[in-house]
Image (tube, rainbow, N blue to C red):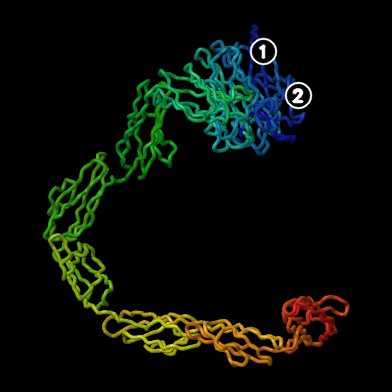
């Protein structure tokens, strides 16, 4: 955000307190010896300047118009000290930064004798503030010079009162957007004023911050930092209107800027004098409540319909005054058209949020003088001669009054012209973007851009190097987008040597040169080499044997870039017109290739014999049981290779034994010795039935005298042995009535015939009873490592708990035959005597409980 004001943000007292100044004069009266004037000095200083820095009085030196010393007006007291803050500058800023500056006024009177050269009143003071963005002042040793020129008696201007800038308040605008600041001066005599940016001057230093006698002009200008200049102190996007003194444009980047404005005073066209004021712009972050923004002008003069663009703050009320008596009020930012009834220059005013105290307005100039049609032509694009440009633009109203050409020569800064039809000498070939700006006496202005190609030799094309049959003529060709003439040499067997398309018939190798000359006299030459052949050659592949169904590349090699034709000898069909073609012979056959160069030709042929590849066979897929072996037998060729070889006895023989552990596909690669070296593969998949999951049931204890049903699983057929006590030996779940301990074995068969076996041991005990040992040894030897109850004739284990001698529970479970492993909370329990209690429901539905002790032995 850009804040234009004459103050500073910093609160710290600094020695760099000067931020601008202005001096002007008023004629008071004439006496017999001279004129009496009141001279006013305004000195702008920072608010944080010390009392000593705001001078209580100043000296103003006076010199005649030739720079000769006249007098020093000493000890001029300070009349007033005005202070301005942010709210004085702009109360409509949402987040106003701290803004504060002061203006010290010093006023005195002086009587100056009559002369013709006039007088200078001067004042110098150090030090100018540091850290300025557009001038060098960071050494805190740069002061300022402020002066006014009082005209002499010549032209009777010695009774004149000079102009002065009356506006003291700054303004705040937003960065990267349009801003407008009215910095007009007033003149007591009503003279005409012309405004411009000008340089600021140095004066005074740390050694002499406030000279007793200020120097006479000319003063030394300050040094501006690139890209800023005295004429562009705010950059190239901000300008001052010479007629109104309005500074407008786009705000520069953040920083502090010294800006000096000069106003030239004229009376009836006669120059009186120049007056300057130096002030400071400061860039800060800020947001205005309302901003009115539209293009500065609409001057393309395309017609009576103008499309107006609104770049203002959104969601406001917008009031347009088109300057022709018509207005338009809207709440939309959309571009819209307005049609003017007549030609003319109109001033458009856009007011945003007019009901608000912080409403804003902006102005634009509209030129309605249709139609301006910009265009230009050019001639001559060679570096050896200037390029001529011509304005071909037309306008229906007014006459052209300004032209500006930019010839796009980036290496130069003076590649411009203000002539209507200029010439420019390009020295380097390349593409150049030419811009042509024009304006008319009615204020219409437009720019047209074209890219031109500058060459050191005129571009053209010609026939390339070529082959030619000695029997044939050849037509050559040259062509250019430029107008011009052609000339061929040597004059050997050529017709039409001065045309773009001559005919030649050389009988030996010859190089013809063609020279193209454009209309400006620039020339370019190309060489066309002709290789004359009386005989041409071609050769293709040797005869060979192929496997039936295999593709083969037919390749022809010739001694030149000829046209090729491949033909199938058997069918007499043309199969290709390139030097390489891929074919797939279905049987023995032949092909020939012919090359042609005009009337010259040559041919060669190739013969193929086809042989069928081996008919590989690996056998029929089969299934085996886990652990079984199987014979693999292949046929169809002379040589065999099986994979994977890891479970094969002889992987390089047609017959081999396989013992796969899982389902495996074996691939055999077969080759033979009959002329087709192509390997052919065949597959055989051996499906392996996994090991049979035979299960006879868990070993168990059975109540003596009670029947017990077995329950085997894992297959589709079962065979039990021995048959003692079994109701059946061929069912998975026979019933046993045996009353002695016994072990049964069951064989389980799958649907594929694979077999597995498992045992179940059964103990028959008297019950119902719960059998519990009185000691156990949990030492990991597999014997008596777990203390468990063995319930016989019980349908359910209700509880099984173990306590140490202090009554602390160390184990609790209701799982059948699980038992205690002698650990307490994961660690081995101490060798000791433990109390147990067990309860279960017997086959009669009664709860039976037993208690006792067990000794843990380690």
Q: Nearer the viewer, residue 686 or 324?
A: 686
Q: Against 756, is 392 above or below? A: above
- Residue 256 shows up from this direction: yes
- Residue 404 shows up from this direction: no
Looking at the image, residue 268 sits to the left or right of residue 667; the answer is right
Q: Against 722, is 169 above or below? A: above
Mark 2 crowdedness (10 Å alpha carbons): few <14, some 14-19, many ≥20: some
User: Which residue is under mark 1?
Assistant: 111
User: Which residue is under mark 2?
Assistant: 56
Number of residue marks: 2
Residue 73: x and y in percent read 70, 19
Determine which quarter of the picture holds residue 300: top left
Q: Residue at x 20, y 62 (%)?
A: 562
Q: Against 816, is 172 above or below? A: above
**Quadrant housing the C terminus:** bottom right
Q: Nearer the viewer, residue 710 or 300?
A: 710
Q: Residue at x 46, y 85 (%)?
A: 624
Q: SS class of the residue under badge 1?
A: strand
């Amino acid at each position: 955000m850009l804040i234009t004001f004459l103050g500073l943000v910093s609160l710290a007292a600094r020695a760099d307190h000067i931020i601008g100044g202005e001096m002007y004069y008023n004629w008071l009266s004439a006496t017999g010896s001279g004129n009496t004037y009141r001279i006013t000095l305004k000195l702008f200083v920072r608010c944080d300047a010390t009392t000593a820095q705001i001078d209580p009085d100043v000296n103003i030196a006076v010199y005649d118009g030739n720079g000769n010393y006249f007098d020093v007006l000493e000890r001029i007291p300070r009349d007033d000290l005005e202070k301005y803050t942010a709210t004085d500058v702009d109360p409509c800023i949402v987040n106003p930064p701290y803004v504060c500056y002061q203006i010290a006024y010093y006023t005195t009177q002086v009587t100056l004798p009559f002369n013709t050269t006039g007088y200078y009143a001067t004042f110098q003071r150090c030090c100018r503030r540091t850290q300025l963005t557009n001038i060098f002042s960071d050494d805190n040793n740069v002061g300022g010079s402020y002066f006014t020129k009082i005209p002499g008696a010549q032209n009777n201007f010695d009774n004149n009162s000079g102009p002065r800038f009356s506006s003291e308040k700054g303004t705040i605008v937003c960065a990267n957007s349009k801003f407008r600041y009215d910095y007009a001066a007033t003149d007591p005599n009503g003279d005409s004023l012309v405004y411009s940016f000008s340089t600021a001057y140095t004066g005074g230093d740390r050694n002499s911050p406030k000279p007793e006698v200020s120097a006479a002009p000319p003063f030394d200008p300050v040094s501006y930092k690139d890209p800023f200049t005295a004429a562009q102190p705010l950059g190239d996007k901000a300008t001052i209107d010479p007629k109104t003194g309005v500074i407008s444009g786009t705000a520069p980047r953040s920083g502090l800027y010294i800006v000096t404005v000069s106003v030239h005073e004229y009376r009836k066209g006669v120059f009186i004098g120049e007056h300057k004021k130096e002030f400071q712009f400061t860039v800060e972050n800020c947001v205005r409540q309302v901003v009115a923004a539209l293009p500065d002008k609409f001057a393309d003069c395309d017609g009576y319909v103008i499309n107006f663009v609104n770049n203002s703050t959104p969601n406001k009320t917008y009031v347009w005054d088109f300057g022709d008596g018509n207005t338009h009020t809207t709440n939309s930012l959309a571009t819209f058209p307005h049609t003017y009834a007549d030609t003319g220059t109109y001033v458009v005013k856009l007011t945003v949020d007019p009901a608000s105290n912080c409403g804003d307005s902006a102005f634009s100039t509209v030129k309605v003088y249709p139609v301006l049609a910009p265009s230009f032509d050019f001639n001559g694009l060679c570096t050896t001669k200037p390029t001529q440009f011509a304005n071909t633009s037309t306008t229906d109203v007014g006459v052209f009054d300004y032209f500006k050409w930019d010839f796009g020569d980036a290496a130069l800064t003076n590649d411009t012209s203000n002539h209507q039809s200029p010439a420019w000498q390009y020295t380097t070939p390349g593409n150049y973007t030419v811009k042509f700006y024009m304006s008319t006496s009615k204020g219409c202005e437009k720019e047209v851009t074209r890219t031109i190609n500058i060459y050191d030799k005129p571009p053209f094309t010609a026939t390339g190097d070529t082959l030619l049959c000695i029997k044939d003529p050849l037509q050559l060709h040259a062509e250019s987008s430029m107008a011009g003439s052609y000339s061929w040499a040597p004059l050997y067997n050529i017709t039409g040597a001065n045309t773009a398309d001559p005919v030649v018939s050389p009988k030996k190798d010859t190089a013809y040169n063609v020279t193209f000359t454009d209309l400006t006299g620039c020339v370019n030459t190309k060489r066309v080499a002709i290789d004359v052949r009386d005989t041409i050659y071609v050769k293709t592949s040797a005869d060979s044997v192929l496997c039936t169904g295999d593709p083969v590349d037919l390749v022809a090699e010739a001694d030149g870039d000829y046209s090729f034709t491949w033909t199938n000898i058997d069918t007499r069909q043309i199969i290709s017109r390139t030097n390489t073609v891929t074919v797939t012979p279905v049987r023995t056959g032949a092909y020939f290739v012919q090359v042609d160069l005009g009337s010259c030709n040559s041919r060669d042929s190739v013969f193929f014999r086809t042989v069928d590849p081996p008919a590989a066979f690996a056998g029929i897929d089969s299934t085996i049981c886990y652990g079984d072996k199987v014979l693999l037998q292949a046929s169809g060729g002379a040589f065999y290779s099986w994979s994977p070889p890891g479970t094969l006895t002889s992987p390089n023989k047609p017959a081999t034994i396989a013992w796969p552990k899982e389902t495996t596909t074996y691939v055999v690669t077969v080759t033979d010795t009959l002329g087709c070296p192509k390997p052919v593969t065949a597959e055989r998949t051996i499906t392996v039935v996994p090991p049979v999951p035979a299960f006879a049931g868990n070993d168990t204890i059975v109540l003596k005298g009670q029947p017990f049903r077995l329950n085997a699983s894992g297959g589709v057929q079962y065979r039990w042995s021995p048959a003692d006590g079994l109701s059946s030996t061929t069912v998975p779940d026979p019933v046993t009535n045996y009353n002695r301990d016994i072990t049964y074995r069951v064989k389980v068969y799958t649907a594929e015939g694979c077999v597995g076996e498992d045992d179940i041991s059964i103990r028959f005990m008297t019950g119902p009873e719960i059998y519990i040992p009185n000691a156990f040894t949990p030492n990991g030897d597999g014997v008596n490592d777990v203390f468990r109850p063995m319930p016989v004739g019980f349908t359910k284990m209700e509880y099984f708990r173990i306590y140490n001698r202090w009554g602390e529970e160390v184990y609790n479970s209701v799982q059948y035959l699980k038992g205690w492993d002698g650990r307490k909370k994961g660690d081995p329990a101490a060798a000791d005597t433990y109390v147990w209690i067990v309860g279960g429901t017997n086959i009669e539905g009664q709860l039976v409980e037993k208690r006792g002790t067990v000794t843990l032995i380690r």
